[in-house]
Amino acid sequence: MNMFMNPIANKPPLKPRMRDIARQAGVSLGTVSRVMNGNTEVAPDLAERVISTARQLGYSVPRASEGGELGTIGYVVDMDPHGTLMDEPFQQHFLCGVEQAARECGGPVVFASCGPDLLSGVLPSIVERKLVGGIILKARITTPEPWIHALQAAIPTVLLMHRTTDHAVPSVTCDNYEAMYRALMHLKALGHTRIGFLSEDERERTTPHHIERRDAFLQLQGTLGFAQNPGYIQTPVRGRGEELEDVIVQGVRAFLALGRERPTAIIGAADVYALGLLTALPSHGISVPGEMSVIGVMNTAQCEFSNPPLTSVSLLEEELGRAAVELLQKRMALPRSTPEHVTVGTRLVERMSCIKNNIK
């Protein structure tokens, strides 16, 4: 018996390419590409011939192209420079919702980060290698839009908690208008009529969600009968070398400079601002919630353990993840359909940072 193996003879066969499928099936490369990306405009008998040939050659066929079950999808995240994004429970809830919905629809989820791909100007390897039938992208403000458009051109894509400026890529985001409505109505029920709003002006890095919440606050402030004052909206600019705490202190000082007309409650554009207020207000002699009620947005884990525990509007991250899977499934079935933009509702979580207003 020969104990030596020929390394060439035992080398695994090369992975078939789409052009191999096209040649074997007698169709164009474009037809193969459309079938593999779930394009329903291909004639059923032609699509079946492509899929059958692909299987014969050992090509990994995305199950979504066969109709019915979802098949394997990718959850791609643009990590922050320190790679801490997925360490946050808030972010993990998105993935949990995506995974649960995908499992119910008959397909697993492949997780990948795209930071290195962005630097190299290439698409994620799970896309290049045809390992998934669609992508849910958790982008950041700084994720380049040309790269997002290139991703969508290659594979059905849905953005999660992000939108492109041209709205050309399907997306799922929270309902920021409803978030402000819930916060304001809660404070109104407690007798507050002078409400402040705190965010920051980050110039080119300002998150669209904070802008949407500010605009919703402005609109609802009048329609719901709250007192209106330009000083009730504070968005300080963070100077060079300044920390977030410095921005929050600027906002607090501006609110208190209004004297007897100062707000009796403040809504933070996100929990990070509201949590900062819980420290900054007492340091300026204002007790929370005795003299100032505070509400945040996002309902992050820190809200439970702050002093006092922070009332916050939950964005229902798991529901957002589930909605992204549902939208992606539709997109995979009809990749050339008009891009849809879905918003998911919110829920107010009451804690101890808001009480009935006793200040006239």
Image (spheres, grey):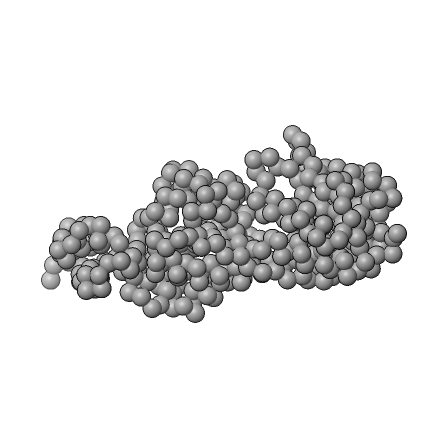
Q: Is residue 343 left or right of residue 3?
A: right
The answer, for residue 160, to whether it is visible in the render is yes
Q: How many marks?
A: 0
> Can you tell which quarter of the image residue 51 is in?
bottom left
Question: Outermost residue toward the left?
Answer: 1
For the residue pair 223 and 338, the one nearer the viewer reads as 223
Residue 307: x %, y % from top left: 77, 55
Q: Is residue 90 left or right of residue 234?
A: left
> Can you tell which quarter of the image residue 224 is in?
bottom right
**Residue in view at x 37 percent, y 64 percent:** 70
> Which image quadrant: the N terminus?
bottom left
> Can you tell which quarter of the image residue 5 is in?
bottom left
Residue 164: x %, y % from top left: 47, 44
Question: Outermost residue toward the top?
Answer: 240
For the residue pair 37 and 63, the one nearer the viewer reads as 37
Q: Is residue 148 above or below residue 175?
A: above
Residue 52: x %, y % from top left: 19, 64
**Residue in view at x 80 percent, y 47 percent:** 263
**Residue in view at x 40 percent, y 41 percent:** 147
Q: Is residue 160 above or below residue 81?
A: below
**Residue in view at x 44 percent, y 41 percent:** 145
Residue 318: x %, y % from top left: 54, 62
The answer, for residue 279, to whether it is visible in the render is no
Q: Is residue 129 left or right of residue 136?
A: left
